[in-house]
Image: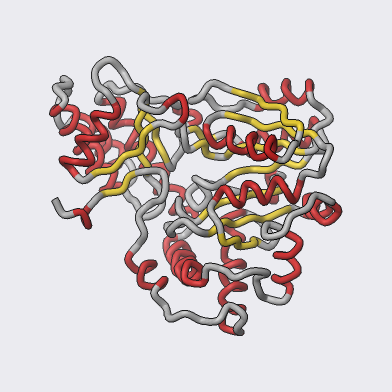
Amino acid sequence: MWTEKTMLRIPGPTPIPPRVVHAMGTPMIGHRSGAFSNLLVQVSEELKPIFGTKENVYILTGSGTSGLETAVVNAIAPGEEVAVIVTGSFGDRFAKINEKFGITTHRLDLEWGKACTPELLASFLDQHPQVSAVFATYCETSTGVLNPVDQLAKVVKEKTDALFIVDGVSCLGAVPCKMDHWGIDVLVTGSQKALMLPPGLAFIAASQKAWDKIESNPRPRFYLDMVAYRKNYEKETSPYTPAVSLIFGLREVLQMIKEEGLEEIVNRHEIMKEMTRAGIKALNLPLLAEDQYASPTVTAIANCPRYDSEELRKILRTKHNLVLAGGQNHLKGKIFRIGHMGYCDASDVLITLSLIELALTQLNVSIELGKGVKAAQEVLLQYV
């Protein structure tokens, strides 16, 4: 097999468009130069529609988790309490970051594969009205669940004066997001998911309400100090050495987004989600998330007596050059996940489903070859 033809269908890092790879090879420039200032201002402005905000979007050199930690250390003061919605591994990560800093953390733990409804959050906040912030995960990568953050934001505003802080790492750039309109106070995403870049950049924006808190927060922080990023951005620069080559790539990604259009990108991801789920259902494989809360960027398929998900992934990887993701934490070895975000379209979904059918057949699972692909094709025909 040709390893360069490996098909990476995991929920991050995701494939990188060739033109973005080329852009990242742009000759290096000084990060204190006028050329970099122009680059930084351009990409920061063009990130705003993806966030759905008029606020500045700040670029950190670090993974998505660095953005999550940035949200915590800037927005939560010593002695405060927070609520964290935990619907999977990354909600759990938000809780652990808070706990690491000694913050009293009230966890709203839900069964993995379930979404947090407004009713559940409202009841939980009735028990914890004193919290200064509520943390949520927009797309829970580990389970393929898309939480209704627009509705959750409304509950937070009705029930408390708390900040609403959202992890959008595995979905921003592929789903609707109206940070200002919905009332999200701090929003974080990363480079290696729907934004079609290598890992290494995190992006964060904050409301004016959040900034009032951030600027008065006595909690020590240095590299992740949002005040430093804000002050330096006013001078069109970054407080510390940025990942210049990744930002060159980001400029090209944003150009691609502009060319396709955000609405069209959201529609493309919805179609891929519907195709994937239709194909998996046609093969009688169990989906983890309900249709109502299914993510447009990643689909999780549960184990069943008919096959072993790790054996299936192994055959796909070694025999067919297709890489799918496994489960995390207590779901390790119990599910597999298909990433369909960023540099991905309907034809990639059809290939993925076809190879899954082949691998299942090689595992002696009784299926009708072509049935999953046919179901996905029928979905696609409704849109083309």
Q: Which residue: 80% across, 49% down?
A: 219
Residue 150 lies left or right of residue 358; in this view the side is: right
Coordinates of residue 122 in the picture (x, y in percent): 72, 25
- The furthest residue to the bottom: 34
The answer to whether residue 281 is left or right of residue 250 is left
Given residues 332 and 124, the one toward you in this image is 332
- The way the protein has been coloured in the rendering is secondary structure
The residue at the far top in this view is 305
Residue positioned 38% across, 51% down in the render: 14
Against 195, residue 170 (above or below) is above
Residue 48: percent from the left, percent from the top?
A: 61, 60
In this orientation, does residue 373 appear? Answer: no
Task: State left or right for residue 356 relative to residue 141.
Answer: left
Q: How many marks?
A: 0
Q: In front: 178, or 205?
A: 205
Q: Residue at x 39, y 74 (%)?
A: 25
x and y percentages locating residue 362 in the rendered image: 13, 28
| Position of residue 285 measured from the top left corner of the image (x, y, whole percent) | 30, 23
Q: Residue at x 52, y 24 (%)?
A: 114
- Residue 163 appears anywhere in the view: yes
304, above or below 299, in the image: above
The quarter of the displayed image where residue 204 is located: bottom right
Position of 156 compared to 188: left or right? right
